[in-house]
Amino acid sequence: MKSLTEYLTFEVKTRRAFVNITEHVTKLVAKSKIQDGLCLVNAMHITASVFINDNEGGLLHDYEKWLEGLAPHEPTSQYEHNKTGEDNADAHLKRQIMGREIVIAITNGKLDFGPWEEIFYGEFDGKRSKRVLVKIIGE
């Protein structure tokens, strides 16, 4: 069995953003030379996520609106966590909803996606550097 471990680093300029990282992960699968295996993509921060969905601007806007409705950033005083001096309780909750990681099959040296599937990094407390782990294993 072979493996490849790489880290992607993102620093978005806004508090919240969705970044399509499909191309980054695709290049790492090619670099690994693995033909049959699994690719784990994991957000390594508790206020960020990785998920798979359609790369459609309206849908990404709907995610933003939906998440803000479920866990609004303001007023920050509504959250117990923010009494510690933080202002990112909403980001923790949004990450919990969107998920920490994804696993994608690799078949014939390529990510084995369904129709319209792409990989996104979701940032909910941005303006600082954060890492995403990509771990690829297989033959």
Image (tube, rainbow, N blue to C red):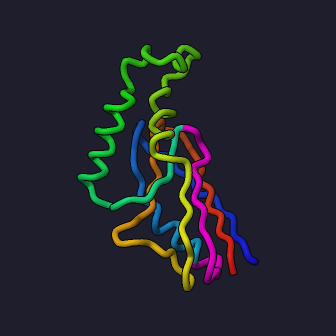
Q: Residue furthest right?
A: 1
Give the residue furthest to the bottom. 108
Q: Nearer the viewer, residue 23 or 106?
A: 106
The quadrant in which the C terminus is found is bottom right
Q: What residue lies at 54% left-to-right and 22% top-to-bottom?
A: 86
Percent across and percent down for residue 98 are 45, 45
Q: Residue at x 60, y 50 (%)?
A: 131
The residue positioned 35% from the left and 72% from the top of the image is: 115
Residue 41 magenta: yes
Which region of the structure is painted magenta? 30-46
Farthest-out residue, left: 58
In front here: 49 or 113?
A: 113
State left or right for residue 33 relative to residue 18.
Answer: right
**Image quarter hosting the N terminus:** bottom right
> Who's the residue at 44% across and 14% down the image?
77
Q: Position of residue 51 (x, y in %)?
A: 46, 54
Q: Can residue 135 be found in the magenta stretch?
A: no
